Amino acid sequence: MTNALTPELYWTVLTAGVASILWIPYILQRIRELGPIEAFRDPLHEVPTKAPWALRAKNAHLNMVENLLVFAVLAVTIQIVGGGTAATAIAAPLFFATRAAHYVIYSLGLPWIRTPMFLIGFGCQITLLLAILSRA
């Protein structure tokens, strides 16, 4: 049995794809700082990075993974209950865009722009949640 890929799931998959590679800049910076052998000897990152952007990138990646989990559960539930709406179809690519922008902006250290991106992404999650709850 094959189900059509809804916009909500499509954009969730793209967000997961981006999230799956966002660790790379941080790790490359660790290898650059410590060398490949020492970088791999420090799996718990006990040696602090000398590049503030790298720590911000690591934190932005973790934040994206945390928020992706919530969004993915909501997107899968939308698929299961057939609760997609025009609003949820718009919220899904908007979530992707704001989460990608949040990573870049967070890494650059621009908190006044980072917070609105986070809040817009959160609004996208609420949009899906409300669409699901309206079917209950």
Image: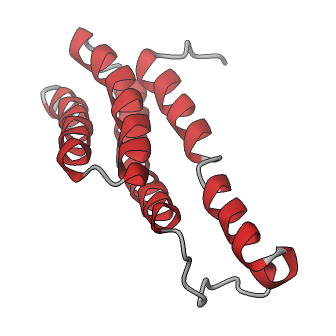
Q: Position of residue 81 (x, y in %)?
A: 34, 26
Task: Identify the residue shown where x is 43% and y is 62%.
Answer: 56
Residue at image point 24% right, 32% down: 124
All told, the count of numbered labels is: 0
Residue 45 percent coordinates (x, y): 61, 83
Image quadrant where residue 133 sits: top left
Q: Tell me what residue is drawn at x 80 percent, y 84 percent.
A: 38
Residue 91 x, y percent position in the rendering: 28, 23
82 or 125, nearer to the observer: 125
Reply above or below: 12 against 58.
above
State left or right for residue 96 relative to residue 14.
left
Q: Could you tell me which residue is drawn at 39 percent across and 21 percent down?
A: 93
Residue 113 in sight here:
yes
Q: Quadrant of residue 84?
A: top left
Q: Residue furthest right?
A: 37
Query: Residue 108, position in %: x, y?
Result: 40, 50
- In-front residue for pair 125/26: 26
Q: In which quadrant is the C terminus drawn?
A: top left
Q: Quadrant of residue 35?
A: bottom right
Location of residue 58 with respect to 84 vertically, above or below: below
Is residue 45 depicted above or below 76 in this figure?
Answer: below
Residue 84 shows up from this direction: no
